[in-house]
Amino acid sequence: MILLLTGLPTPIINTISGDSFPTDVSLLTKKDLKQITKKKDWVFDWNKELKFLDREVYKLTIVNNPNIIQGLSCLTISSDHVLIHLIENAPFNRGKGKLYEGVPGNLVAYACKLSFQRGSQGFVSFHAKTNLIDHYIKTLGAHHFGGHLMVIDTEAATKLVDKYFKL
């Protein structure tokens, strides 16, 4: 099977209207930090994540609306896999009243896409909260390697990229 790594992420779905919106993934900038603070209900310190030289921080936005961040991910790209340090939905995309669905799946699929592009055969790892391990096995095809360590292998990564990136 040949995997083409082009295309935009799958649209995210507005939970109220059911409308879908195509998305972009791009690097987070220092200018973006003004809108992602703890005072604005973001959980993680993304300013701190941007300071690590071995990490890349990505934002998911809606096409033609790049100023409203839907979610963020922090990655380290090594020679054999991509490590997801953090993923966070925007405050308005969390819980039962969330505005958009599909943000975390887009960001994980993007990490898989980067892994393929950078020669790591789609391998991605992350540490899961204990209560989400089964969820990640079911929804991402991740493998549990003990403790909190989860790994997405080439087969699961291919499925995620095929699902979330329309060619």
Image (cartoon, grey):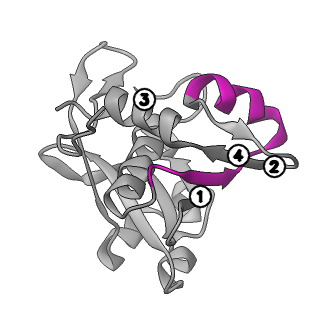
Q: Could you tell me which residue is drawn at 36 percent across and 49 percent down?
A: 113
Query: Can you identify the residue that label 3 sits on?
Result: 159
Identity, as a three-letter code, of the amino acid under mark 1 = Leu
Q: Earlier in the sequence, mark 4 or mark 3?
A: 4
Identity, as a three-letter code, of the amino acid under mark 4 = Met
Q: Earlier in the sequence, mark 4 or mark 1?
A: 1
Mark 2 and mark 1 residues within 8 Å of each other at the beta carbon: no
What separation in Å lies between label 2 and label 3 (alpha carbons)?
A: 23 Å
Residue 62, above or below 44: above
Highlighted range, magenta? 121-139
What separation in Å lies between label 2 and label 1 (alpha carbons)?
A: 14 Å
Query: Can you identify the residue that label 1 sits on?
Result: 86
Horizontal relation, residue 99 to residue 11: left or right: right
Horizontal relation, residue 82 to residue 23: left or right: right
- Disc number for residue 150: 4
Quadrant (top left, top right, bottom left, bottom right) of the N terminus:
top left
Mark 2 and mark 3 residues within 8 Å of each other at the beta carbon: no
Identity, as a three-letter code, of the amino acid under mark 2 = His
Do we see residue 154 in this rendering? Answer: yes
Q: Residue 119 in the image: x percent, y percent? A: 38, 62
Mark 4 and mark 1 residues within 8 Å of each other at the beta carbon: no
What separation in Å lies between label 4 and label 2 (alpha carbons)?
A: 6 Å
Query: Can you identify the residue that label 2 sits on?
Result: 148
Residue 80, above or below 147: below
